[in-house]
Amino acid sequence: MMTHQWPILSTVTFLPLFGALLILMIKDDSDNAKRNIRNVAFLTTLFVFILSLIVWAGFDNTDPGFQMEERAKWLGGGISYHMGVDGLSVLFVVLSAFLMPFCILASWETIKHQLKDYMIAFLILETMTIGVFCALDAVLFYIFFEASLIPMFIIIGVWGGAHRVYASLKFFLYTLLGSLFMLVAIMVMYWQTGSLDILILLNHKFSFHMQVWLWFAFLASFAVKMPMWPVHTWLPDAHVEAPTAGSVILAGILLKLGGYGFLRFSLPMFPLASARFAPLIFTLSIIAIVYASLVALVQGDMKKLIAYSSVGHMGYVTMGIFAANEQSVEGAIFQMLSHGIISSALFLCVGVIYDRMHTREIVAFGGLINKMPKYAAVFLILTMANIALPGTAGFPGEFLTLIGVFRVNHFVACIATTGIVLSALYALYLYRRVILGTLKKENLKTFVDLSFREKFILYPMVILALLFGMYPAPVLNVIHCSAELLVSNYNNAVQAHAGMVFLQ
Amino acid sequence: MQTDLITQLILCVPEIMIATGALALLLTGVFIRGYSYTIVTWLAIAVLVAAVVLLATSPCDGTVFGDALIIDAFSRFSKILMLVSTIAVLVISMSCARAEKFDKFEFPVLILLATLGMMLMISAGNMLSLYLSLELQSLALYALTAINRDNLRSTEAGLKYFILGSLSSGLLLYGISLLYGYTGYIGFAEIADVIAKQRIQPGLMFGIVFVIAGLAFKISAVPFHMWTPDVYEGSPTPVTAFFASAAKVAAVALMSRVIISVFGASVTVVSDSMPVWQKMIIFIALASMMLGAFAGIGQHNIKRLMAYSSITHMGYVLVGLAAGTVTGIQSVIIYMVIYVAMTLGCFAFILAMNNHDGYVENIYDLAGLIRNNPFMTIIMTICLFSLAGVPMLAGFFGKWHTLGAAVGAGFVPLAVVGILSSVIAAFYYIRLIRLMWFDEPKAPFRDVPIDLCLVLILSGSFILFYIFFGIWISPWAEQAAQSLFLML
């Protein structure tokens, strides 16, 4: 409907590539050049963020369908170029664009070698992640989804920690294997429907038998990306070894690709299979919530602890999506968005003290509140948000999800609620060991509080973590219409099928 | 009759030109002393370029010398692809030939003769021209393999290839004689007629199996792949590049034609859901994909690694062929275009692996290359990600087309195995990338010669920007694929 207007989604998606091209042309030899590289990268991401806000501003909350669509002929054989956003995806675009400038800032001084390659990798990654949320062609979606592996693989492998090679290979092969099953499923869907356009696929009614196979193929891909228990093992390794900014992107955006995929493909296209296998998802989700929280409790590495806490939080998301009522789906999306901010901010917090100490072992710290009061305050708010304390951004998502799940299955909701207690346990335990207590260790006594750059990174995140906790309406309003449509289509499909079975 | 002969000859002008060109260059090489290698190489490139131009500008179809040669869109497309890769091989061979002291004028002449054989293979329309062209190509390739005659590995590879190649020729000839014996014809069209009308007798089935086995040897599909790693490793690198690109294109084109226009017509018996050729192709496709993926993991010599990699990729091509539909053949053609681009990029890179000890082939010599030579590393990284089938890059679309064709023909398990093996194979491609990007640097390589740079840039940009011009390749490939089915 807006084809005559400026193609803003393509601009948002591909502008980072333009920035990468500019950086490619800068010779990486002097300090001056390095400053230029940083500035170009930062300004590009900032500009993309502003554009993404324009997308949000231009988004019509009352329209449940796709907006700002762009179509073009492309490779043929069904593959076309089709972009567009709806209430489910638009905020993920904003989230991706929001986190990127912070990633660039977080790597401002810490990246010493191959700065040019690093910034190019990040900008390419930004294009891929925004592209995933805008793509409305199954192959285009797959391309963005999968191509995000390349820059992330290189980011972990080149600028990561001691065991970076192992972690990057594990990350790559794990996710590649998962997503290739989705590729076969997309092929099957193409031969079934004759189209790869997501809009057409959404309206096609696959037979139940077909839905089961396709649903499992998509599950293989999205479950690895989420990650769901038991295919989560790549995540702690990848997080621990990735540089701070890499962890931020991993936790903030890449984990959301799986959840978004469930919302875009699994639930609306295969409603019958989703209904049939919802108990399976519930089981895996509550295992993830309880198990990951318990594992987080015994971690000695801060990043690993937050990584396991992410696995737990993603458990709420999968549970909420497949409970498939309005509260749970909205809660799941809100949870993904808030987790994107909170866990990213937590990783940035870990990065702050890692830059000072070059270790992330919890036992190496203690009593930081004496030297770094501002840091302690920031960390406290984010810890509370991670626990989903009412008033923080973590709360509405988990609360809505639990309400929604309770309507479907009391038992699951009860078990999942224990996860909140467990998350309080590990998060507060972490806080006590790192921040509180007396400052005993000699090498910690030289620590200085947050620098200007660090404040500039962390304060906006903290403000958002509080703001969306107290006033979640701007986010929920965007999601509402599309989520309602998704759920009503799902219910209709399930009821129609039940009616048919009854008649037989 | 007279004019008929002339129109027929006009159809095969490119072949005639290359044949006379090869002979003329042989004479030129004998009479010029001193710089004969350089001059003959450039003249050979000129002949090949002229042949490409002729092919691209003459869209006439027809058959030549009875049914010996078939000129159609399919043969034109394959020939152009094959000639372009031959040109690239000649371009990248020059610096290596000088350094390794096989800069003799026989080298480009032999390449031209092999090319002639390949062109005839692509056009072959009966079993006689099939066998003769295959032998012409093979004899030239045996000599090329052993061209570095002071090198033990090169001569060993030549001998191995000769012995196993003769064996496969024997198989092929035996199969052809069985086909002739049971059908009474050697022309593709006549054999297809006979096969279409009757149930396949056991003897005929043996014939089909032997012919497919002989052809599978040429594209090094499992279980006829044993020669590949040794010959790839032993041959001089430009010759290996020639094996991996042009020779594969010709063999795949020939195999497609034989399968589709001869065996494709075979009637299916009621108790038997699938024709015999399809069973065979599916088996060798599965075996090639899996074996290539697993066996490549243990390789530390980059040329051996490329050998197993090419075995895997031939498996993917055969997946498209197994579908046996227009979409299937279209996917085979597209896959070959992409495969050739990736292979040439990789071999240009291997030829640039040249440090103070001379040419190196061990993958651990690549450690930390990004610090010393970012240009080379980035292009090779693109090639490797593309070989692994990561999206955005051309290799992904190749897999999309072939596996998609298989899914369309109802072979979903085949596509699933293809996917699994591509993850396994991704391991060794990613290991190379890991070495180049993540490890500490070793001895730097010499500066990349300009000719290698050219091929590297061309193949790198083809792979990277396939997303833009894939839109033109698809319809062209579809047209070529359809011409193969017109004969039926």
Image: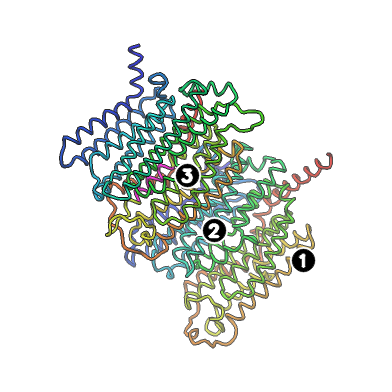
The answer to which of B333 and B24 lies nearer the viewer is B24
Q: Give the residue type at disc 2.
A: Ser
User: Nearest the camera: A417 or A230?
Assistant: A230
Give the vertical position of B231 relative to B129 (above or below).
below
Residue A46 numbered tag: none
Looking at the picture, how far across and down is residue B488, in whole percent?
52, 23
Residue at 35%, 62% in the rendered image? B371
Name the residue type under label 3. Answer: His
Circle 3 residue: B313
| Residue B385 horizontal/vertical position (percent) | 46, 51
Name the chain under label 2: A
Q: Are marks 3 and 2 on the same chain?
A: no
Residue A96's disc number? 2
Amino acid under disc 1: Cys
Q: Chain of mark 3?
A: B
Query: Which corner quadrant holds the C terminus of chain A?
Result: top right
Whichever of labels 2 and 1 marks the residue nearer the N terminus, that label is: 2
Q: Residue at x 33, y 21 (%)?
A: B10
Residue beneath disc 1? A414
Residue A206 is left or right of residue A342, and the answer is right
Asked which quadrant contains residue B23, the reply is top left
Q: Is A448 placed above or below A468 here?
A: below
Quadrant of the image containing the N terminus of chain A: top right
Spatial CA distance of label 3 from label 2 is: 36 Å
- Span of residues in magenta: B339-349
Give the foreground label among 3 and 2.
Answer: 3
Tags 3 and 1 on a common chain? no
- From the viewer's perspective, is A499 left or right of B211? right
**Mark 3: which secondary structure?**
helix
